[in-house]
Image: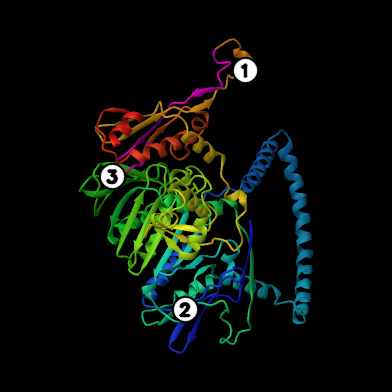
Amino acid sequence: MEVNYQYPSPSMCLQQEDKTVLGLSPDLSREERVSFVGGLKHPLIYRDAMLMLREIVISDMSQKKKERLEFFAWLEQEIERRLQKHEQFLPGVREKLRKDMDGFLDEIDNIDINISKLVKVKRDLQRDIDKYDIWKEYYKLERDFWKYIKNRDAALWWVLDPVITVHPDQVSFEAFSLDESTYGCLSVDMKEFNIKGTPQLGTTNIDFSAKLAREMERFRTYTNVELSINPEGFTVDTGVTPEYLEKKIDLPETWIKGFNQVSAAACLGGIDIELLPVDMYDICSYLRRHKAHKSPRYMKWILEPNKRIKIIFEPWGKELELTAVYKGKKKREEKIWGRRRWLVMEKIIPISKSFKIKLLGFGMPQFLIADLGTMKMTIGFTSWSSNDWVKGTAFNIMAGFIGKGTKEVYNLLKDKRNLTLDEINENLKDYNVKENKAGVGMLLRKGEAYFDPINDKVRFRQLCNIPIPKELYEITEMEKQVEKNLDASLDDYKLKLTDALELIASNSYNIPNPRYRNYSYYRTPDYDRKFNRSKTEITLDQDGQIIKVSCDCKEFKKGPRNISAPCSHILALYMTSSKFTYADLKPNVDYNIKKLFEELL
């Protein structure tokens, strides 16, 4: 998908009297002309948070393909060398080579003398030519030019500029990493600003270059900083010729889908852990000082009720005990891969009051929320570095965002700008909860809204300046199959609570019979049976997280056979069973659907 950005000028820092204006140029190609002017009360906190956001944008921890050209060049030389070594030891060859070599050396000596004379003549001629050559400084100028381009704006050629949204209660800055594995959102409360004029609400991309980042690094405690988002640009009072920027970026489909899948994942329930800045410092310090050169490479979090949290770093087996205490009710262990991405948090550790970590379970993403006072930084990591938000789990399905839903959600959110799911249902009473939730899900996948996990609100935001192509948000075959499985019979549905308070749910769904109408099985019971019945089972913990899955369908077996790649049967069973997570069930009792409703009613 190709997008075009039009900026009235480059973003820049301007010195005006006793203040520094941080001028962010918005995209003029959008329908809403966003504008905002406000003095920052804590400019250094804002500086570090924005610089961290830029690090997320340009981060790329994906595995690079190794270049094989050098290897094959070396291999060719090695073969040639061994052939020559073999030939020189053949009978009679060595002596002949010696005689020929002596003759050639004499000829080379004579040629070298002539070459030296010619080189001297050439050098003298070149010296005379250089005196009158108008191109003698060309290569130096060319190098300086490309160095200037690199320092000024190079990153903008291959990353998407951050997305800024002015809400009635906050200003948010969103970014997505180059490798599509890390999401960042800086939420700045309106209390942080001394607002001037009337803000114009809306969403836009901002021109955030490497040059602007270097200017922001110069902010100090005595710097009076004013944030300005001005659609008129920032070249009028600078004495610089106005410069109109146009950028064309070809966005990968996975980048757009991933950006929109983050919100669906943020809606899922999980374990919440509170960490102090010293805990985050200890984690980052260890990761900074150690780099694993072999597998396994993960952090194993050991969580015991009312005890300090422990982390074991593999492959070293090193145990780190944090000061934070786990407040959950059950002992558990969580493994986290892609841990070196956590180093992006280093920049904001000194300015953070606390960190909230949300773990969604094995093979699922993690969310980190840093409390910076009037600002909050939300970071979302995929389950591991090489896994983007599109691969694996269908988060919108697990969050219950299935179907197209009602389009009235769009008009409501555009008017109110941010609402909780309950507030959306309250305003749209003419539609049922399922339709409203499906409508919210459609907005998330179309990039017209995002979920704010800090306030549990859905916020209106248009990701791109043009509508996203239908094929990027249309209902998938997986969703259609899940919806079909949800309507299937629950006669085989069973639920059991173990002594460890884990919920084991199972059900059977129709799966195609590969022997149906196959003449190899003619006159057998398999020949006329169109469907087989699956054996699908999931295990949920007390927090409703999936800790174990199994299904004997073909789709599940051909994958890694875990929650990172669930089939439609597992997703349907999860959605059905999550409704009974907090039901008052007796341990070691087998419940069917009829008995469950009797218990609940």
* Left or right relative to 306: residue 291: right
Q: Distance of mark 1 from mark 2, alpha carbons?
A: 72 Å
* Left or right relative to 331: residue 459: right
Counting the numbered discs, the total is: 3
Above or below 392: residue 177: below
The reply to whether dot 1 and dot 2 touch (C-beta < 8 Å) is: no
Q: Tell me, for residue 159, which label it has, or none.
A: none
In which quadrant of the rendered image does the N terminus lie? bottom right
Q: Tell me, for residue 302, which label it has, or none.
A: 3
Indicate the position of residue 408 as horizontal and vertical percent values: 51, 56
Amino acid at pointer 1 = Asn
Q: Secondary structure at mark 1?
A: loop
Indicate the position of residue 309 as horizontal and vertical percent values: 26, 49
Which mark is in front, 1 or 2? 2
The stretch of residues the image draws in magenta is: 525-547
Q: Earlier in the sequence, mark 1 or mark 3?
A: 3
